[in-house]
Amino acid sequence: MISRRNILQGGLVGAAAAAVGRLNPDFLFTSAHAQAARSLRFLGAEALTGNWDPTTHTNLGQLIVEGYVFGYLTRAPMTPEKPEELIFELATSMEPIDEYTLEVKLREGVKFHDGTPFTAEDVKATYEYGCQPDRPAQWYPGQVKVDVVDPLTCRINTKDYGYPASLYIYLSSFLPVMAAKDVANKAQLSARMNGTGPMKFVEQKGDSTFLAANPDYFRGAPKIPGVEYRFVGDTTTRTLSLMNGEADMIERLEAEQVDTIAKDDRFVIHKALSVENKYLFFRCSKPPFDNPLVRLAACHAIDREGILDILGVSGAPSKAHISPVKFGYAEVADYPEFDPEKCQELLAQAGYPNGEGLPELTYYTSVGFYPKTKEYAEYITALLQEQGFKVNLQTLEVAAWGNLLYDKEGGGEGNMIDCGWCTGSPEPDLVLRTHFHSSSKRITGIVDPEIDAVLDKERNAATVDERRKVLQEETLPTIARKAPAYSLFTSVFIHAYAKGLDGLYIFPNGMQDVSKATLS
């Protein structure tokens, strides 16, 4: 069991400095211990889009469903002890040929759910489509070419685009592989999922998405006959549904619900340090947060220990802009801490002594998805107001909040918005480059040449060890100093499930491996 006060002790931080990912082909594929009898009903906290093209969204609920259905070249358990470990799935080996070429050998005998054999052409189609700049998900580090050597060998080639192919080592665990013929037919790609995973897409009805076991799954037919992902936005409703037998597993619990469920021996509580940090994002493209002094002042006004007290079991301390289960993690020595005197000093330097002259600032938060957002947002608002920031807190339902989340021409809505960012890979640029490089600036709108330079330097490092060093000594400290966002905490993901569910693996981004699970 983990606690928020000791979660970064006992070697978890040091594990991130280990050598590049060891590949263990058997980690996720252990035998379950019971006989399955029925389908699994999982109540998720986020509604799905209904567009099944994986490149069209950043929706965590949909990533969870994709994890059942699609296959990946590798998988990343992302345990605190081994944050860089990878497991081969559709790939059987990955070998660098040179700085710009990564050769991938593929598993023989795998088929998509429609019966189409899986080959190197599918990897080529997936990667060359997903990397296009117009794709909303923007998970790729840049455009890429994939050369097909033979049906079971391909080479990921980045030379024309000027960045190392080794970036795809960790990304390989997060990019779902689509069938080439689906990529060629965008209407079909959007209309239904067709993967190589243990579950097959059946249909979506209202808030429920139904999947059925894939009898031809290459690791063996799943024992659970199917999965229903049902969106239930309210945490109390999810909890009552589990306890009344209307659900088998639920997610995103708050402390009070954990206490209630833990007293009932019919259920299991699963806690794990997640890949998600929760951030207060500043709108950096417009005043006053276009000034890094004002952003840092706001950071020093916030008592993160108090936020952890509000969160209880759902949060762990953070001293960097990535989670400890990401490649390259290290605590930043001078990460901004609660210091009202420093806040006032920075406000005065920025020309706003005691906050005088600052405009009213709109702060958006959501309710129903992340734990305790309303409570800690109210606490943050009070702390900022105490230092002279005039803050108007707007608490929104998830759909309305999501519509305001991203940057746009002229700057995103409001001045601050809190959000987590949860990706199923140790690759740090899925967070850092996505949000803080001027080529993406997803939520913040930040354009800062110094941040761009340190992000480009770590991305273009010649070796994995050099990249880790740049991340830890230059990239993370620079982002902390410029503060386009403030990492409030690292999320602890909490799931509760029926004791009859066995053989399940829950990844640190909430995705699940049910290929050998049973439910009695």
Image (cartoon, rainbow, N blue to C red):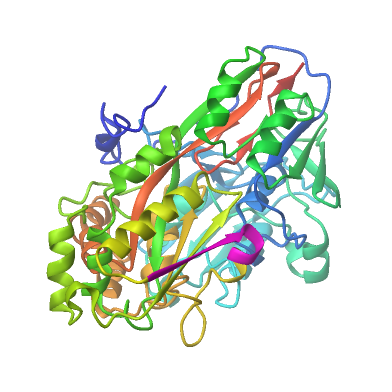
* Residue 317 in the image: above or below residue 397: above
- Which picture quadrant has residue 229? top right
Is 170 included in the stretch rendered in magenta? Answer: no
- Residue at 49% from the left image edge and 39% from the top image edge: 508
Residue 295 location (% of width, % of height): 28, 70
Number of numbered tags placed on the structure image:
0
Q: Is residue 353 left or right of residue 432?
A: left
What span is in magenta?
391-401
- Which picture quadrant has residue 335? bottom left
- Residue at 44% from the left image edge and 45% from the top image edge: 275
Residue 361 visible at all: yes
Viewer-proximal residue, 357 or 110? Answer: 357
Predominant SS of the magenta segment: strand
Q: Is residue 254 left or right of residue 400?
A: left
Residue 86 location (% of width, % of height): 46, 39
- Residue at 68% from the left image edge and 58% from the top image edge: 122
